[in-house]
Amino acid sequence: MKQAKTHNNVILDILHKFKIHDRFEIEWVDASESHVPSINLPLANHTVETRQQEMGYFLCLQKGDTWHDLHLIYYLKSVDRDGCGPGQWHITSVPVYLIKRIVPLTKKEALKESKNGEWLRRMRSRRHRRHTQRFSDGSVKFVD
């Protein structure tokens, strides 16, 4: 009897089909910390999970040296800070087990997304800064 694939196996099947520089949209769960006025259970969902969504370009799959967890390594953009050097790459590393959804984008879809700027708006709103969120229940969430 054939066993159903686990969520991680489905994600890995998608990732193994990628080639370097392939464009995709990803949703994953990130760590965060919160200050809450009380610890009545169950806690509000915004104190439990932080969902990240962005678009990136595939670089590789690589295991970490310490825990040997497989990570998706991708880049968001190349940054040339002073205008005269080779630039730097803004890369992200996400453990595969934290990925909830990943969708390959065709060149046509990637071009459409980059033209309307939606991916850039999402990237800027979700990443590149530590911010604080305050909720009506008095809790405060800190997100990297």
Image: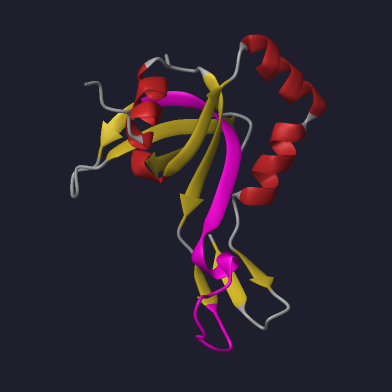
Query: Above or below — where is 65 with respect to 102?
Result: below
Residue at 39%, 23% in the rendered image: 15
Which residue, as the protein is rendered here, is positioned at the far right? 116
Does any portion of residue 62 appear in the rendered image? yes
Residue 78 appears left or right of 137 = left
Question: Where are the magenta residues, as a range?
Answer: 35-60
Residue 126 appears left or right of 68 = right
User: Residue 93's spot in the image, x, y percent?
Assistant: 40, 41
Residue at 39%, 14% in the rendered image: 17
Residue at 40%, 33% in the rendered image: 73
Q: Is residue 103 magenta?
A: no
Q: Front-most of 9 and 111?
A: 9
Q: Front-most of 52 and 90?
A: 52
User: Residue 113's spot in the image, x, y percent?
Assistant: 73, 24
Count of numbered badges drawn on the protein? 0
Q: Is residue 39 magenta?
A: yes
Quarter of the rendering containing residue 4: top left
User: Residue 102's spot in the image, x, y percent?
Assistant: 51, 30
Query: Above or below — where is 95 with respect to 45?
Result: above
Query: Above or below — where is 108 with respect to 62?
Result: above
Residue at 18%, 49% in the rendered image: 66
